[in-house]
Image: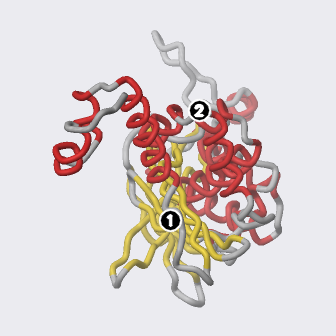
Amino acid sequence: MLRSYRLSIVLMLAGGLSVSATGCASSLLNTEMLKPSNLKPSIMDGHGTEQRVVGLFTDAIEENNEAAFRRIVSTRFEQKAMRSPDAFKDLEILNLPKTKLEVVESKELGNNRLEAVAKEEKEGTKYQFIIVKDDVKNRWVVDDIMLRQQKKGTRATKSSVEVMDLLLTIREFLKTWETADRSAVLQAVNSELRGPLEKLPEPWLQQMIAQISAECESGMARRPEAQMNESDAVVKMPSKNGFMLLKVARQDDKWLVSDLEIRKRKSDDHPGSVLRQARAMNAVTDFLAAYQEDNQERLQKLTEEKFFKNAISVGDLT
């Protein structure tokens, strides 16, 4: 009997403990649940899942291993922050952690999302990670790291994904602008700037594009200075004779340039921003058209009251 009992135990173990009670078709132990990608962090001791993900993330950066890095970040992270061939190298701008971190705090955000705080062992610097269960990759990965931004004595927390998305948008815009392709340029700016640019005669638009392109230089968007919030950003970059300022705004869940301007170091005389120039040139063309048509109503709207009353309304426009 003793041997028979032991034999039964061995058979049960060999069968993966797939013993079923009467009326129950499921096994006592489902091995599928033991896969790391399916384990819920809430049942892991010492923030196990979060620690594993953060460790793989920092290891990939320290080893300069792009393939490993792409495996441990989310599909969203790759699509928004790593959509260019040089994106992995550009991550240096973010000053992401390269040393070993210890997860000291974690909380569930719902919908398979976690927020974890990890700390450097030596310096004590803390980093805030957003970790998600990626539906495409079917595992827990880093979806974002929140960065601290210093501005006028106050601190703000910014998404590393949004910072990289902004940087790549600026580079893509500069390449598009230098092509001088009217359709492509108009698609790369937001509606506030697109309207005035669309009204410009082609020679005027091409001249404006050429003036800005003449100040661009290779690599100028490598390390831009950016101040950003959720809805807009101002980016400053060096140019050939000074610097370029770009105003960027969120529209339809993506960054689009809303204005740009060149400032020269050795001159206070500059034509102003592209938006301001476009509006001024459109005002001139609208005035000339109304003047040629002797459209008094239109002219009144396009001129100052004193100028219209003392000159336009009493003059002979024929």
Q: Residue at x 44, y 62 (%)?
A: 228
Does any portion of residue 114 appear in the rendered image? Answer: yes
Query: Residue 300 location, x and y as percent?
Result: 22, 36
Q: Is residue 270 above or below residue 211?
A: below
User: Mark 1 to mark 2: distance in Å?
Assistant: 25 Å
Q: Can residue 5 be seen in this view?
A: no
Q: Which amino acid does label 2 sit on?
A: Asp
Looking at the image, is mark 1 or mark 2 nearer the viewer? Answer: 2
**Mark 1, secondary structure of its residue:** loop
Residue 188: horizontal and vertical position, in percent? 59, 40
The front one of 76 and 221 is: 221
Percent across and percent down for residue 58 are 69, 67
> Mark number for residue 46?
1
Q: Residue at x 53, y 74 (%)?
A: 269
Residue under label 2: 135
Q: Which residue lies furthest to the bottom in this view?
A: 122
What amino acid type is highlighted by mark number 1?
Gly
In this rendering, the answer to whether 197 lies above or below 244 is: above
Quadrant of residue 317 within the rendered picture: top left
